[in-house]
């Protein structure tokens, strides 16, 4: 819920960090709904470049990238890139 998300964002900021929403086009809520809501809670950036439905080892998905870039510009958020590499066996994604 928003109260918990806001508390997490505040804690990240208090620790000197920047809060970034990972892969915003992969949630139940659409990016069009999610990014404005999270921007209002004080998030700093969004993972814009991400391989959503791409079978290649790693290449950003054009449709979602364009959508997230437009939303991040509207809400003055910075853009990040992720490979979603969670272990050594997935290093080919880099």
Image (cartoon, rainbow, N blue to C red):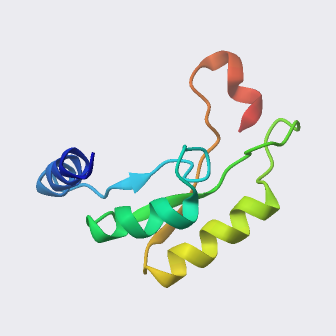
In the displayed structure, 27 sits above or below 92; it is below
Residue 65, given in percent of the width and then of the height, sits at 70, 63
| Extreme residue toward the top, this view | 89
On screen, residue 45 versus residue 88, left or right, reads: left
Question: What residue is drawn where x is 60% and y is 47%?
Answer: 82
In the displayed structure, 64 sits above or below 57; it is below
In the displayed structure, 72 sits above or below 41; it is below
| Extreme residue toward the left, this view | 14
In the displayed structure, 49 sits above or below 68; it is above
| Extreme residue toward the right, this view | 56
Question: What residue is drawn where x is 30% and y is 70%?
Answer: 40
On screen, residue 38 versus residue 57, left or right, reads: left
Labels in figure, total? 0
Residue 12, given in percent of the width and then of the height, sits at 21, 50
Question: What residue is drawn where x is 43% and y is 81%?
Answer: 76
Question: What residue is drawn where x is 76% and y is 53%?
Answer: 60
Residue 33, given in percent of the width and then of the height, sits at 50, 63
Residues 7 and 57: in front is 7
Residue 61, given in percent of the width and then of the height, sits at 79, 54
Residues 40 and 28: in front is 28
User: In the picture, which quadrant includes the N terminus?
Assistant: top left
User: In the picture, which quadrant includes the C terminus?
Assistant: top right
On screen, residue 53 versus residue 49, left or right, reads: right
């Amino acid at each position: 819920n928003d109260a918990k998300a806001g508390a997490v964002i505040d804690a990240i900021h208090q620790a000197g960090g920047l809060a970034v929403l990972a892969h915003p086009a992969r949630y139940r809520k659409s990016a069009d709904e999610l990014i404005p809501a999270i921007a209002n809670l004080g998030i700093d950036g969004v993972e814009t470049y991400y391989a959503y439905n791409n079978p290649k080892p790693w290449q950003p998905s054009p449709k979602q990238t364009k959508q997230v870039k437009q939303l991040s510009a509207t809400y003055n958020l910075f853009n990040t890139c992720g490979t979603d590499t969670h272990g050594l066996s997935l290093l080919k994604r880099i």
